[in-house]
Structures are given as C-alpha cells and as structure tokens.
Amino acid sequence: MFLLILLLFCFTIFAFVVTNKGAGEKISGKGYKEYRFGDYSNWLQKRVDKNWNRIHSCLQDSKICDTLMQESNTKADDFFKEHLSALQSGCCKPSNDCNFQYVSPTNWTSTSTSSTTNPDCSIWRNDPKVLCYGCQSCKAGLLDNVKSDWKRVAVLNIIFLVFLIIVYSIGCCAFRNNREDNAWKRYP
Ligand SMILES: *[C@@H]1O[C@H](CO)[C@@H](O)[C@H](O)[C@H]1NC(C)=O
C-alpha cells in the first residue's frame, strides 16, 4: 500500500507538471481563442507527434467541423463573435495571422497580404476533407483537450491519494496498537 501511495504521488506530480504549460490565446476582437502547439509541454507534444497519422485521419472522419460547415450563410462579424472549441478553432478555420478573406467559416480566400511565416497558412484548403486538419494549430487544439483531461485525472488522483493516506494511517495505528497490546499480555 505504501508503494501504491508512492506511485500515485509520483504520477500525480508528473500529471501536474505536464499540464502546467500551454493555454489558448485570446485574439483581439474575436470570440474564440487560438492554440499554438509549441506552447504545450514537450512530453505531450512528442506523444501527439508520434501518433499524429492516426489522430489526423480520425479527426478527418469526425464531425467536429460539421456545425461550422452548416453555417455557410453566417456573416463575418457574427462568426468572429462565436465561441469555438479548441478543436474547431484549430482544425476548422485558418489561423488569424494568415489574414485570409472570410467567405464562410470553412471557406476562406488567400489574399496578397497573407502571412507566409506561419506554415499552417499554406496547408489550409477549402476542401471539407482537408481544411486545417494537417495544421499545427489542429494538433494544438487536440493537446488542449488532452491537457484538460489530464488535469481532471490529476485532481481526482489527489482526492484518491488523501483517502489512501487516511486508510494507511489508520491501518498502521491499528497494527501498532495491536502489537503493543499483545506484547503487554505476553510479558506482564
Ligand atoms: C467557397 O466560396 C466560393 C465563393 O463563394 C465558391 O465559389 C466555392 O465553391 C466555395 N468553396 C467551397 C469548398 O464551398
């Protein structure tokens, strides 16, 4: 039980360290946040990179961008006020710094002022199967979800840990008292 407590303690510390870094960035004048892959913990980045092929095709088959695709008549101003989930913000629209011209949430035209420094901008396609699923911002959106899940696990772990420590202490006390009682009976 002591080993279990020790292991759980180490894992909890690790989970907090891993989820400590990275958060969405507020974009001025927009209701949604944007996410950058490099902001998150290196360890999580590596795990996502390693499995990215599978995650990528899984995201492509998912319906995360469907609600945005249905909003084809939404005006730019209304869309910019919307709140988007991390995955929607990262995978379904181009980054803000691409300066693309808005047509609909999932249809944008590249302009002459478009940034070329962000590699995501050249990955973007209006094709519903492509969009920004291959972007770094999409990885970042996924990482943000993973991070929130880990944080929840870490908090649950602490509760469980406190419970285990209480049980362990009671057990230890009972064991010691029992031994002292017996010792006293045996040697009056
Ligand atoms: C994007 O909008 C343009 C202009 O309205 C349209 O011609 C094009 O077919 C649209 N693309 C997609 C993939 O919906």
Image (spheres, rainbow, N blue to C red):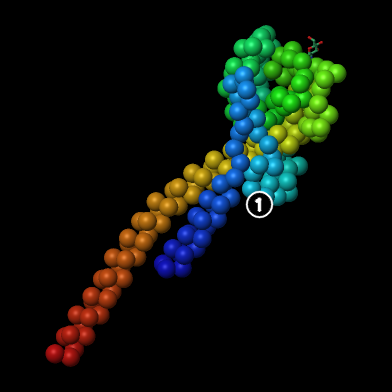
Whether 53 is drawn above or below 67: the answer is below
Q: Tell me: 62 left or right of 1.
A: right
Q: Tell me: 187 left or right of 39.
A: left
**Label 1 element class:** helix
Judge by depth and name the residue closer to the eye, 172 or 75.
Answer: 75
Q: Measuring 19% from the left and 80% from the top, which residue is drawn there? A: 181
Residue placed furthest toward the right:
112
Q: Position of residue 76 (x, y in %)?
A: 67, 12
Q: Measuring 56% from the left and 52% from the top, which residue is drawn there? A: 17
Image quadrant in which you'd find residue 87: top right
> Looking at the image, how many numbered discs can be counted on the residues?
1
Q: Measuring 32% from the left and 66% from the top, which residue is drawn there? A: 169
Residue placed furthest toward the left:
188
Image quadrant in which you'd find residue 186: bottom left
Judge by depth and name the residue closer to the eye, 37 or 179.
Answer: 37
Q: Residues within 10 Å of mark 1 (few under 14, many from 20)?
A: few
Q: Position of residue 45 (x, y in %)?
A: 68, 47
Q: Tell me: 181 left or right of 76.
A: left
Image quadrant in which you'd find residue 62: top right
* Type of amino acid at the residue the image marks with label 1: Trp
Q: Quadrant of the C terminus?
A: bottom left
Judge by depth and name the residue closer to the eye, 148 or 21.
Answer: 21
Q: Measuring 32% from the left and 62% from the top, which residue is drawn there? A: 167
Q: Position of residue 8 (x, y in %)?
A: 48, 59
The residue under label 1 is 43
Specify whether residue 58 is in view.
no
Specify whether residue 80 is in view.
yes
- Quadrant observed for ligand 1 in the rendered image: top right
Q: Quadrant of the N terminus?
A: bottom left
Whether 40 is drawn above or below 92: the answer is below
Whether 126 is drawn above or below 146: the answer is above
Residue placed furthest toward the bottom:
187
